[in-house]
Image (cartoon, grey):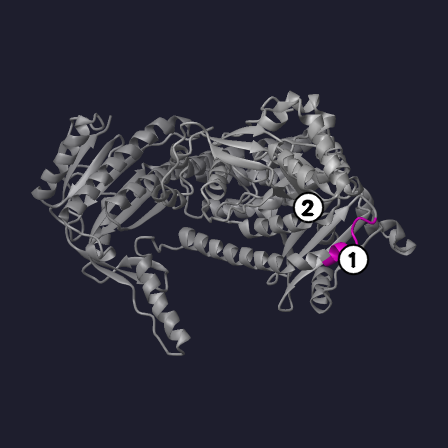
Amino acid sequence: MANLHKKESPFQVFISFKKYLDILEHIRYNDRLEYRANYAESLIEKTKNFKELRDGFQDLSVFEKHKDLIRLLLADLFPTGLTKNEIKAAGIPLTNLTFNYTERFQNILTDAGKDFEIEFRDISDDEYYVFCCCLILQTYLKRDIRVNTPFYYDIPDKKGIMKHYKITVNSDFSYVYPAAETKIPEDAVIDMLLENMDDIQLWKKYFPSESWILNGFSIISLVDCTTEVALSDLKSTLIKIDLENPSPDENLKEIFKSYFDVAELNFGLMLFNNKNKRLEKLPIYDSVFTNYLLDFWLNTFDEDIRKTAFENITYNSKPIVISDVDKIDDEIKKLPSFNILKDHQINSFMVIPIMKDGELLAIMEFTSPIANSLNGLKLKKLEFVADMIIFSLTRFSYERNNQIEAIIQREYTTIHDSVIWKFRNEAERYFNAYLSKKIYTLKEISFKNLTPLFSFSDIRSSSDKRFNLMLEDLNQQIDVLHDVMTFLNSSNSEKYLLALDVFENEINNEIKADTEQRFQRILREEIHPYLQGQLEVKSDEIIKNNIQNYFSQVFVQNDLFYANRKNLDDSIMLVNRKLADILDQKQVIAQEIFPHYFERFKSDGVEHNLYIGPNIAPELPYSAKVVHELRYWQLETICTMEHEFHLFKKDLPISMDIASLIFVYNEKIDIRFRMDEKRFDVDGAFNSNFEIIKKRLEKAHVKDSTERITCPGKITIVYFGMENQREYLQYISRLQKLDILKSDVEFLRVEDLQGITGLLALRVSFN
């Protein structure tokens, strides 16, 4: 038998029959029925030489030594006439150790297997410890705290179905008292403990481990409440479905097995998309659900038949229950669709439409290889959980729609978290007016007097690279076609060889704006159909292989070779993703400095805007210091992006460089949400000057030279006045001390742009 102290507790546990022997003593001297007095005296005489039974013991080998005597001693508590019906045993208080089982209890443990060990269900070690302390308060200190925490055993039957038993305990034959030198807590301390039920260290401080004595034995009785527990577990599981944390409960199938009392059971469910009139799987439950019948329905019938079937379900939503597949009509067994049952060893099944307000929400299926395991009685049991299933599916659909709306807002609109409060306030006014049946016109959303910050990290010469790679792709395609046509050696191939020579000359000497389009057209309308025809009529394997090799290199979307340009596209995509990810991670820090409106764009590189001002977060204190901190954040972030890019660039399919620029603008601007474009934009002609300068800086040169102001490996800061210069020199100095920037600061003048003069620039290399 196992050790007494499996869990830490405030008790030293001793097994003792003293209280029961005292009751026998009372019967011996006071019972008027002579046979009862004689029986009690006989038991007392049999035990008088074994003092450990009265005084208490912890050595579990004593049970084996006195097994027959203990069974005789407890015979009154375990009547032979009830042994096949009652699930009952004697137990060691507050442990999982039991003895003296009724026949039914013993059979249950035998069916569970020799390696099975009963354990309390769903109680942590800390909860168990506090529960023991509460028993002390209730029994010894007489505090009316009603400790009635239910305990359960989970015991599998011989078919493997998990059965759940509620434990009732009779503790009349045990008692609690403090060990020597144990200090009993005062009332004020007990009140404090009861206010801090989760503070295990506090409980252990006033009720140390093994500081109290628990002496005696208990009588435990089990009640089979499998259906009730499984139903509760099922409801809890359905409520717990959380799209924020989509982790499916792998025990769902086991819960259904217990609830239906079916050893081999499969369960499937699909949601019904009312808009598209089709069933949809729950992706997070792919590993749990087995939609055998529903999958067959989806994949076998055409769309019109499925839609008709769903319409019929709306009018007649009666479930389909087949207890024994072998008893289906022979005509049905001859149908090809019957094989779905044989292939998956389905001998009993239920298909149940889930309806709400006359509309189909979902369809459930239960299947089993055991004939007659599913029937009308099992279907009746689903009525007890039907409302919870409907609630869970409705909630799931509602939350899924909310998540989809959130994805749309996050990925396809620019309503940033920092400004969403203003939209929400306006939406609340609109909604409240709607509830009051009043007319309300949505007001314009704008923010005034903001300081803008702008920066870009541009992929240098991407247009030139794309043009040169296009020439490489076209020349490669012409070369391969030239070889194929030469090998075909027909009159048509001669004609196409001349056309290819004309295009090759044009591409490499005097390419026109429509050269690629005209080449595409002749490929699509003439050359490719001709080659496809040759594949069908030619038997020469070499010719076929040449043609197939050519088509394997063709990009199907545009009929052109595209490998080199695809490498460029992939490189640009990887660079943009890397830079954008760094920027997004750093944005979390920037928002902590002060909430601001942020937007970024990806093209051939990444650019971003920050708009800062007190009316974006009116409840927070705002000063010029906020702008300075965010300007430093921006410069440091660009340095990080440059550094990470240079570690990352060697892995790109196409070699490339980036050049970064920060534009410092001191004027305040306004931004307004444009309803037609669903995005913020600068508001008014005066504010548009900021946008104009941004666009012209991308290709700007150093004054009186042909050199671009941006340069790979360096960061350029463009500004208007000396005050900005001093500010950024301080930031650069800080980053130089951190060994992020080098000491080669350049002071530049920017060429005069259309309507813009007097721009200055700093340029510095990073380490």
Q: Nearer the viewer, mark 1 or mark 2?
A: 2
Which mark is first along the chain, 2 or 1? 2
Q: Residue at x 21, y 25 (%)?
A: 739
Q: Residue at x 12, y 48 (%)?
A: 757
Residue closest to the eye, 744 or 354: 354
Q: Find out whether residue 377 is within the magenta segment.
A: yes
Please name the amino acid that badge 1 sits on: Gly
Residue 613 placement (x, y as % from top left):
20, 54
430 left or right of 248?
Answer: left
569 left or right of 499?
Answer: left
Residue closest to the eye, 211 or 52: 52
Q: Please give the residue where the numbered disc 1 appears in the rendered image.
A: 376
Q: Residue at x 40, y 74 (%)?
A: 434
Note whether 96 is above or below 530 in the view shown.
Answer: above
Please name the amino acid that badge 2 sits on: Val
Residue closest to the eye, 222 or 539: 222
Which label was assigned to residue 223?
2
